[in-house]
Image (cartoon, rainbow, N blue to C red):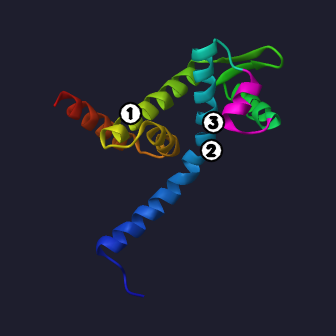
Amino acid sequence: MKERTGKKGDRLEAIREAHSLEGKFSRTDRMEDYLEVIYELIQEKGYATTIDISRYLNVSSPSVTKMVQKLDESGHLNYEKYRGIVLTEEGTSIAKGVHARHNLLVEFLKMIGVKDDMANLDAEGIEHHLHPETLKKLEDFVRYMKKK
């Protein structure tokens, strides 16, 4: 079989790399979504309940309870049934990071002419899937464009 080089070969290598990284990140995507929603709820209302999380993530209450218990066990939050949810320092840090990535992506998308609602929707879809170096370059670009 002939070895491929050039653009097509590079693309195949990029696909392989993305799929090898997928397992490392896919587990945390959902976790980050939960932490982000909990953080946003606490910022907005002062507290977060499993019912609120269920409504915002469009998942069943038992699924929320199961994930919240996992996040409690992993040290990202403290959860007591019927008492509420409190993010730990680590959980808060992750949630703030996701929040910042989301805002950066929305800002960039709006700069290139994407409407607010679509920018938020698109940012939600890609906020977990960009390499930190890419995000840093995007942040530098947005900062540069704002100075102009």
Q: Does the magenta stretch include residue 59?
A: yes
The one of 146 and 21 positioned closer to us in this rendering: 146
Disc 1 marks a residue whose amino acid type is: Leu
Marks counted in the figure total: 3
From the image, tell me which residue sits under label 3. 31
Q: State the image coordinates of residue 19 (x, y, percent, origin top left).
A: 52, 59
Disc 3 marks a residue whose amino acid type is: Met
Disc 2 marks a residue whose amino acid type is: Arg
136 left or right of 62?
left
Q: Distance between the residues labelled 2 and 3?
A: 7 Å
Residue 104's disc is 1
Instruction: State the SS at label 1.
Output: helix
Mark 2 and mark 3 in contact? Answer it, CB < 8 Å.
Answer: yes
Q: Residue at x 73, y 29 (%)?
A: 68
Residue 54, quarter of the rendered image = top right
The one of 31 and 90 positioned closer to us in this rendering: 31
The one of 4 and 49 positioned closer to us in this rendering: 49
The quarter of the image holding the N terminus is bottom left
Q: How far apart are marks 1 and 2 (CA)?
A: 23 Å
Specify few, some or many for label 2: CA neighbours under 10 Å numbering under 14, 14-19, or 20 or more.
few
Residue 134's disc is none
Residue 14, quarter of the rendered image = bottom left
From the image, tell me which residue sits under label 2. 27
Question: Of discs 1 and 3, which sits in the foreground?
Answer: 1
| Main secondary structure along the magenta-highlighted residues | helix
Which segment is the magenta one?
49-60
